[in-house]
Image (cartoon, grey):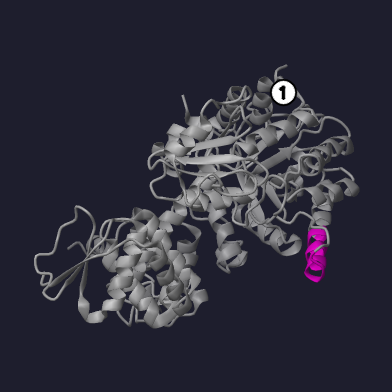
Amino acid sequence: MDSSGAVELAYDGSATGCLCAIAEACELGEEAAPVFVRPGGERSLFAVASHSIEASPERADRFLRDLRERSSGDVVHMVLRVLSAMPDGQEPHLYAFVQKALRHGTHILQAHADDDVAYVREWARRVGFEIHRFTGLLRFQEFKSGRLVALYEPDYEITLPLAFHFRRRLAGESWVILDCGRRHAATWNGKRLNSESPDGGLLSGCVLDRCLEGDGPSENEARSRELWRIFHRTVAIETRCNPGLQRQFMPTRYWNHLTEMDP
Amino acid sequence: MTLEQKLSILTDAAKYDASCASSGSNRQGAKIGNTSTSGICHSWSSDGRCVSLLKILLSNVCLYDCAYCINRRSNDIPRTTFTVAEVVALTMDFYRRNCIEGLFLSSAVYGFPDRVMEHMVAIARTLRREEGFGGYIHLKAIPGASLELMRQAGLHADRVSVNIELPSEESLTRLAPEKTRSSILAPMAFIARSIHESRAERKLDRRAPAFAPGGHSTQLIVGASPESDLQIVRLGEALYRKYEISRVYFSAFIPVNLYDSRLPPLEMPPLLREHRLYQADWLLRNYGFQANELLSESEPRLDAALDPKAMWALRNYHQFPIEVNTADYEWLLRVPGIGVTSARRIAGARRFQSLSFDDLKKLGVVLKRAAFFVTCGGHHLDLHRHTVESIRRALTSGMTPNHAEQLTFGF
């Protein structure tokens, strides 16, 4: 591929960094032919210039605000959903999508046959689907302190949107949602999300470990789990047995943290 | 008897009810729990059905002797009844752990219908008032209970429903002698009217009490009695129109009482027929079809090999192909392989560009079905060589248009 005249934009691989890199690309203008590089990514042999982009939350915020004003909240929402997944090779599509959204406004979302729009929509759909899935599949355990604790391993970074759901649903409870793979957590104490965290973002797993120290499943917990297993086992109709269909809706990779699928 | 044993018995007794929907209601601001308009599935059981609600019977002690029912009084099975406190505690325990979206409570008729219904209402009231529960509650009304109790049920529950059980009055008399058509239709009509009035009042004043904001549904058994698909689909259509019902559920008859000679001797529940009826029902509710377009006195059965939309399209093949770039949305919906989502996408995308077959694929259209019925910018995929018969063969064997052509012409 001829990438002469290309400008290399190296960023730290984070969602914030990616937004800053796209913001930079937009500022360079359309002739710049940006090449986005993550840490460990392949560098361009032909780039005429290379910029190292700092991941600045303020710059990312400014960029999203501007995008919202010139297109819509829906467009920004789509971009954020894709960034929850950070799929390989997302940057050119996201950059092109943003350019088109800035040009056409929110109507661009209707251009389903456009490759970049289709790409963004598809990844936003996957992330949205996983969020919806876990609004159902997440299981809380009751701890001795009365706090509810949920462990899970999602494919994408969805802890915050899930926390927004449970903030409404379990408003009067105090709970923790822990993404075991990424070691990220969201907490709710009945008033505030992540009140223990000074910056208001997600907690790291170590902070969580400290605040759960000495706590553990409550006395009721084992019986409650057993009752749920009894219900789940009994509600199936034997003559309609269809485990393949069950796995299709509830893939085995989620079973680790599901009370009813736990042997 | 332990709580574990009771739960096991009363879940087993409730599992044949098909409904598990938790959608249509939007309850916010309670101490614990809310409902979401689209509903949420929390698990799937080993039969592949979704688990959204704690679906149990209050009791399986029954005075009635309905031929198709596992809980009929002639059956020698363990019997038990939950207390109000037990159901409330189970619901709250499971809800806090996010196992369920709420409660679906039904019951056998263990005494006067009013007494049973009173207990059910007490459970809903305790959940709402004492536990501050804002999750989903679906109560199955007991035929014969007073309308005042129905009213109270509707004020606490998100959905109140009455099962119509069998598609005709004759079958009901034959198989469920203690139930009558009027004991089922009277509460259904009352619920429909109350929902209608409550919605109208709430349009004027948001604070007016909501009556069953999630609407009402019903269920009927397919294959236990001789009614045709035409009768069943027409019945469904009438229920949607007359009672503004949200959903009609079909339950393939499962022969649980093999000794009863009034029932057909089936080896397996008629699952395919149930599936086709759901597809036809879907066309009625979301695709603008009418019962008499799909079936008629001369053709009263749905095609087992073809889904009802493809069946309709082949019978009306003279009206195809349609041009995707110009056709009305209503017509797009009628093309096999194009669903509500892809029809909407087509309507949006064609404002930006003229759509080709490749574009349709990107939009999620199932081309191996739709290609027989549409053109893109005047082009079609060798459509002119096909006959209704060859398309039918292609659709039933899952072949693409090109394969079908090879078969037809023996290339």
Q: Residue at x 47, y 52 (%)?
A: A201
Residue B146 vertical placement versus B16 (above, below): below
Which quadrant is home to the N terminus of chain B? top right
* Left or right side of B94 for B164: right
* Left or right side of A162 for B185: right
Q: Identify the amino acid type marked 1.
A: Asn
Residue A39 at least partly seen: yes
Q: How many circles with numbers are drawn on the protein?
A: 1
Mark 1 residue element: loop
B194 within the magenta span: yes
Residue closest to the eye, A239 or B134: B134
Q: Residue furthest front?
A: A198
Q: Residue at x 82, y 44 (%)?
A: B180
Give the percent coordinates (x, y) of residue B63.
Answer: 82, 29
Q: Quadrant of residue B59?
A: top right
Q: Chain of mark 1?
A: B
Give the percent coordinates (x, y) of residue B334.
Answer: 49, 70
